[in-house]
Image (cartoon, rainbow, N blue to C red):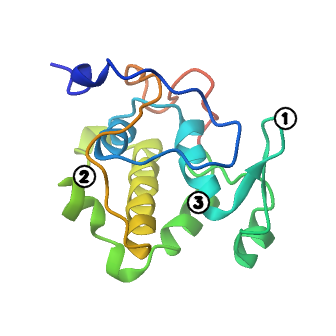
């Protein structure tokens, strides 16, 4: 049974075209962990929260709200799923007291041995960072909220969804 089937009544939300951050919810973060969204969508959840803004052509650049360290290291949209340095930087930016939020708030015990692929572990990092972002602001995680059009989990978890960048 698909745990997201009851949420299908919500209208799909298009990809980000503005710097407005997509609303976070438990349902959305669980969909990210289940590999039901594109890698780009995962990045679009993080970029505006880091101070990146889209330029109108689909490219996100570090804006005035981005920290100097992000601006210097990643002046243009860091690919958190496809690129190891971006994922490592994201991991290191999570405060120690927030490192276990994925387990504490979502009950996520990790992937099984057969599910351990860089794309999936980087998705877990992204979700943990998003939970830490909420915690640092004292914001609660909503149970439900808008969802993008959910995809089936990719048949090849190494390659990901059509259009996902190769993982390096």
Going from N to C along the chain, the mark reached first, 2 or 1, is: 1
Q: Quadrant of residue 105?
A: bottom left
Give left or right: position of 148 versus 26: right
**Residue on which disc 1 sits:** 57
Provide the residue designation for mark 3: 49
Please state, as top left, top right, bottom left or bottom right, where the N terminus lies in the image: top left
Q: CA distance from mark 3 to mark 1?
A: 19 Å
Q: Residue at x 56, y 54 (%)?
A: 46
Residue, x 79% and y 62% (percent of image)? 63
Q: Which image quarter: residue 40?
A: top right
Which disc number belongs to residue 110?
2
Q: Report crowding for label 3: few under 14, some 14 to 19, many 20 or more residues within 10 A (C-alpha).
A: some
111 over 65 or under it: above or below: above
| Element on which disc 1 rests | loop
Numbered mark located on residue 75 in the image: none
- Residue 111: x %, y % from top left: 26, 46
């Amino acid at each position: 049974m698909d745990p997201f089937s009851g949420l299908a009544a919500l209208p799909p939300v298009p990809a980000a075209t503005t710097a407005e951050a997509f609303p976070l919810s438990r349902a959305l973060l669980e969909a990210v962990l289940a590999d039901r969204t594109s890698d780009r969508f995962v990045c679009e959840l993080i970029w505006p929260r880091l101070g990146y803004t889209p330029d109108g052509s689909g490219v996100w650049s570090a804006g005035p709200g981005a920290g100097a360290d992000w601006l210097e290291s990643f002046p243009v949209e860091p690919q958190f799923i496809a690129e190891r340095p971006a994922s490592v930087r994201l991991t290191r930016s999570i405060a120690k007291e927030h490192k276990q939020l994925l387990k504490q708030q979502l009950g996520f015990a990790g992937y099984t041995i057969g599910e351990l692929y860089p794309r999936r572990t980087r998705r877990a990092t992204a979700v943990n960072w998003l939970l830490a972002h909420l915690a640092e602001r004292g914001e609660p995680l909503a149970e439900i909220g808008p969802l993008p059009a959910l995809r089936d989990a990719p048949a090849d978890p190494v390659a990901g969804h059509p259009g996902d960048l190769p993982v390096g």
